[in-house]
């Protein structure tokens, strides 16, 4: 199929979006590289603490007026933003593919998911209603109203450059807060583009700010006295040891969605065809760089003949996945985001084999369609007889690697799954309602999939994990997001 046109044609150094202006950073700029072609497509500044201070000051200034703007007037701007997103849907998607490497269909899915969060936030007015009690004492009434808190920092990872800030941003601003977004410096173009749409939609200056950069920006946000709260999505070491800890020290609200190691349990009574189709997307979609990607496949019970035939079919299906540049519409799996991520995954595969796992499919020398450097590409890899306690069986790999393990029955499969420290998106494939229900009750996971491989909740449902996958109280999206971005203030009035 034809190669789609690349939207980013001219290299430029990105700027920050502060107080409604595009401002050059004084920080040093680093390269943004298309991982399929290994060509530079932009430069992104590593912004300074001073630039964070300016963005927070702009947001604080804007807050005074924005919080008084009616919920429907705020929603109207979000409606306009949503229209602009729809008008530019294809361009948004292609930018993600160009900067991240995922296939164009994966990017289109990501664009849609991002837009859905804006759509849900457009209806926030009813969720901002309060509660009222009359005559709590004679002639005295009491009520509570959810109110915005001020300025929030939104810190994003590399794997969903467009969607992840949209798990927070629309709810935050719809509720009357102002925001400073810090995109991943590896994939800064999608948020830069979103900033342009925000500007065109006509948001008042300072309501929505973007500061590009790395750790300096994160630290400055975490330490800033005028930041009321932080939403973070990224790895567990950063989320738990840096963000959650620092927010505890500085007394900020925090929601930190972190790493994962998702287990998929396969029961012998599953619909084999559909299970294998779901497995291909879940293990290998987004080249395995997804917090909801399955990593371990636990085949529970069943005969040896079932096991052998099932695994053979899984390997056959994975072998046909076409690897290449995501803007080629026939591509089914793109590259990893950068060479160091590929090296990390290679390290896990090698370690796994050393620890006794058997490679049934080895993606280390992939057959890449088209004339692209192999630098970031890896093929689907399937390891058998993986020990769940080994490094490859227990740690987050974040690459296209499936580890297969056996359990004697459902109970053992659940025990193996729950022994892992993460709890983000575990799933089961079965045709038995009773088995599915038991799994749903007993498995320790923020999101549970029953005959679903990628357990991504819709925008009007909350989204977050448990154990080492989440640090905080309220989750992202939906009603949880509305509560996270508001405070409850009780007023008591005597009617003379
Ligand atoms: P990361 O932790 O390396 O980076 C996340 C953000 O934190 C980036 O903006 C980065 O610049 C910043 N950062 C990194 N190290 C820092 C430090 N020491 N101090 C301050 N800031 C720092 O994560 P990543 O590699 O970009 O993303 C992949 C991770 O994100 C995976 O672990 C994945 O599971 C996780 N993730 C989780 C979810 C979820 O919903 N649970 C969703 C997507 C991704």
Image (tube, helix red, strand yellow):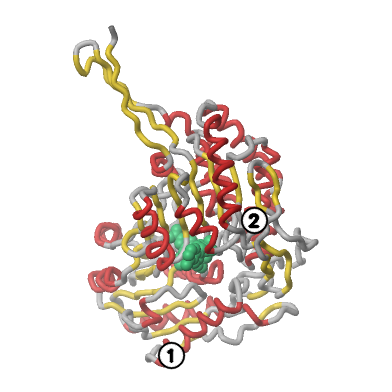
| Residue 274 in view of the camera | no
Label 2 belongs to which residue?
190
Label 1 belongs to which residue?
353
- Residue 87: name its quadrant: top right
Q: Look at the image and tell me in which quarter the N terminus lies.
A: bottom right
Against 161, residue 494 (above or below) is above
Label placed on residue 8: none
Q: Is ligand 1 closer than 8 angstroms to the Cβ of mark 1?
A: no
Secondary element under disc 2, as helix, strand or loop, is helix
The residue that appears at 37% across and 67% down in the rendered structure is 270
Q: Look at the image and tell me in which quarter the C terminus lies.
A: top left
Could you say where residue 90 lies in the image, as x and y percent from the top left?
70, 53
Q: Earlier in the sequence, mark 2 or mark 1?
A: 2
Decide: few, some or many residues near mark 2? Use Cα within 10 Å; few <14, some 14-19, many ≥20.
Answer: many
The residue that appears at 69% across and 71% down in the rendered structure is 325
**Most foreground residue, 79 or 249:** 249
Labelled pair 2, 1 in contact (Cβ < 8 Å): no
Residue extending farthest to the left is 137
**Most foreground residue, 103 or 191:** 191
Could you say where residue 83 lies in the image, as x and y percent from the top left?
66, 39
């Amino acid at each position: 199929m034809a190669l789609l046109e690349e939207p980013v044609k001219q290299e430029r150094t990105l700027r920050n979006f502060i107080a409604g202006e595009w401002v050059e950073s004084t920080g040093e700029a680093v390269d943004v590289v298309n991982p399929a072609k290994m060509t530079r497509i932009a430069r992104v500044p590593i912004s300074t603490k001073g630039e964070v201070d300016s963005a927070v000051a702009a947001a604080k200034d804007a807050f005074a007026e924005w919080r008084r703007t009616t919920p429907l007037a705020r929603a109207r701007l979000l409606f306009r933003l949503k229209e602009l997103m729809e008008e530019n849907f294809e361009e948004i998607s292609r930018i993600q593919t160009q900067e991240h490497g995922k296939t164009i269909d994966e990017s289109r899915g990501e664009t849609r998911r991002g837009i859905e969060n804006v759509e849900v936030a457009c209806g926030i007015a009813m969720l901002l209603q309060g509660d009222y009690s009359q005559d709590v004492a004679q002639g005295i009434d009491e009520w509570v109203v959810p109110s915005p808190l001020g300025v929030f920092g939104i810190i994003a990872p590399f794997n969903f450059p467009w969607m992840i800030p949209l798990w927070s941003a629309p709810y935050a601003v719809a509720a009357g807060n102002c925001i400073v977004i810090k995109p991943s410096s590896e994939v800064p173009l999608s948020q830069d583009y979103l900033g342009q749409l925000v500007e065109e939609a006509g948001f008042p200056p300072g309501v929505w700010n973007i500061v590009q950069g790395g750790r300096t920006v994160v630290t400055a946000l975490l330490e800033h006295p005028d930041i009321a709260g932080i939403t973070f999505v990224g790895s567990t070491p950063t989320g738990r040891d840096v963000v959650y800890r620092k927010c505890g020290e500085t007394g900020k609200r925090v929601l930190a969605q972190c790493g994962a190691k998702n287990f998929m349990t396969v029961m012998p009574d599953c619909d084999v065809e559909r299970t294998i189709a779901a497995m291909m997307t879940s293990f290998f979609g987004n080249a395995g760089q997804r917090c909801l990607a399955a990593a371990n496949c636990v085949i529970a019970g069943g005969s040896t003949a079932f096991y052998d035939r099932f695994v053979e079919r899984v390997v056959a299906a994975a072998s046909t996945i076409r690897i290449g540049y995501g803007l080629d519409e026939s591509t089914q799996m793109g590259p990893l985001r950068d060479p160091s991520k590929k090296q990390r995954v290679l390290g896990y595969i090698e370690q796994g084999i050393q620890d006794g796992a058997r490679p049934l499919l080895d993606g280390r020398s992939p057959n890449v369609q088209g004339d692209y450097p192999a630098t970031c590409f890896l093929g689907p890899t399937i390891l058998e007889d993986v020990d769940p306690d080994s490094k490859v069986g227990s740690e987050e790999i974040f690459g296209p690697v499936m580890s297969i393990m056996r359990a004697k029955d459902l109970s053992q499969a659940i025990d193996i799954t729950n022994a892992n420290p993460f709890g983000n998106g575990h799933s089961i494939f079965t045709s038995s309602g009773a088995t599915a229900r038991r799994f749903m009750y007993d498995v320790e996971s923020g999101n549970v999939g029953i005959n679903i491989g990628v357990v991504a909740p819709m925008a009007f449902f909350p989204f977050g994990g448990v154990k080492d996958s989440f640090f905080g109280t309220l989750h992202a999206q939906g009603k949880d997001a509305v509560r996270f971005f508001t405070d409850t203030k009780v007023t008591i009035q005597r009617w003379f």
